[in-house]
Image (spheres, helix red, strand yellow):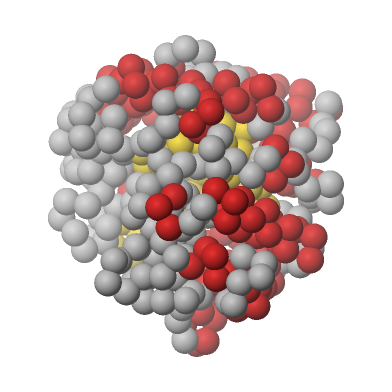
Amino acid sequence: MKFFILILTSILFVSCSLSSQNGTIDSKATKETIALFNNMKKLSKNHTMFAHQHATEYGHGWRGDEDRSDVKSVSGSHPAVIGVDFSGFSGRSEEQIERATANLRENVVNTYNRGGVTTAAWHFSNPVSGGGFYWRDDVSKPGVKYIIPGGEAHDQYKEILTTIGNWAKSLEGADGTLAPIIFRPFHEFDGGWFWWGAPHCTVEEFVSLWQFTVSFLRDSLDVHNFLYAFSPDNKFNSEQDFLERYPGDEWVDMVGMDNYGDMGRDRYDHETASRKLKIVSDYAIKAGKLAAFTETGLESIPDTTWWTETLLKVMKKDDMQLSYVLVWRNDTRSATHYYAPFPGQVSIPNFMEFYNDPYTLFENDLVDIYK
């Protein structure tokens, strides 16, 4: 079955490269970034790539092993998309930031050299108060209004973005080109748990933050290997709700949704999860964007049929076009905080059905996604 997928994938990539056009929001995007955008769009018509947060950095009971992931230990392949985080790029000592950026550079470049894809979230420590990236009533300040243009910490924010921008321009792969990144800042902004969430800034402030972030990275710092992903949590019930804080089509390459609640954490509501994903997918198709299921999962995966009877069924309903689906991390120390199987975990037989389904793509299935 996977051989068939490889053949089909090769045909799709060739077709895409022959009709390549820059559908990204960056007119100076690198060839590899444009190819990634176009190939993901083409592939999403029939397939969805599997993604796992921090998959190759650490896993259940281990950290920092070379060319290892729990998914690879179970299936023989890394996830097609590896999730990383820019949390280490600010709010720490200079030495810690330097170490974090170096480690992350190695991870991203290794993924690129293997032919895989990287997406970066940003658990951004509040730059104007304590509390970290969460909103804490006793210490947190509404940081967005302080760091947007005209805010008293705006210059500080530009320095943080400069660290990200310089790092992005150092991601040189073995072929001499820069590894593209799907950058997903300020996620789950419709909730109140992060300091950039809806209760802590106005729509106008959030849109200003998004537009400045993209503009400064792309136009001032000349970062041309990023695709920008917009992803609320699952609180919306219509396209209008979904777009309430949308900064405009000229500022977004990918739209997505994070949804744990409907996928087994709070309840099993396949109908609602599919309906909301379809809102995301339909908008992407209409606006010429990519769509993704940007975060989901069931902690500890006690449901031994979750992969095919919940995740696959939700994504396959209603003919959606989703570039990837990302499940959250496998903590290195916790006995229960994990979202992908590892050797001996009870959902492995069902996960292998998920792996072997023609709809899903893993890293070993990708062929020349940057060409």
Q: Along the line of sight, which residue is nearer the eye, 281 or 127?
A: 127
Q: Residue at x 22, y 37 (%)?
A: 265
| Quarter-of-image position of residue 307 | top left
Q: Along the line of sight, which residue is nearer the eye, 365 or 39?
A: 39
Relative to 356, say whether 365 is above or below.
below
Q: Residue at x 38, y 47 (%)?
A: 191
Relative to 244, say whether 286 is above or below.
above
Q: Position of residue 309 (x, y in %)?
A: 28, 20
* Residue ranking furthest to the top: 318
Q: Position of residue 277 (x, y in %)?
A: 45, 25
343 sits left or right of 91 in the view: left
Q: Position of residue 228 (x, y in %)?
A: 63, 47
Q: Along the line of sight, which residue is nearer the eye, 202 or 256?
A: 202
Q: Position of residue 90 (x, y in %)?
A: 50, 75
| Quarter-of-image position of residue 74 | top left
Q: Residue at x 83, y 26 (%)?
A: 19
181 sits left or right of 263 in the view: right
For the question of whether residue 324 can be seen, the reply is no
| Numbered marks: total | 0
Relative to 192, say whether 367 is above or below.
above
Quarter in which the C terminus is drawn: top right
| Quarter-of-image position of residue 259 | top left
Relative to 111, say whether 123 is above or below.
below
Q: Along the line of sight, which residue is nearer the eye, 293 or 78?
A: 293
For the question of whether residue 27 can be seen, the reply is yes
Q: Residue at x 47, y 12 (%)?
A: 318
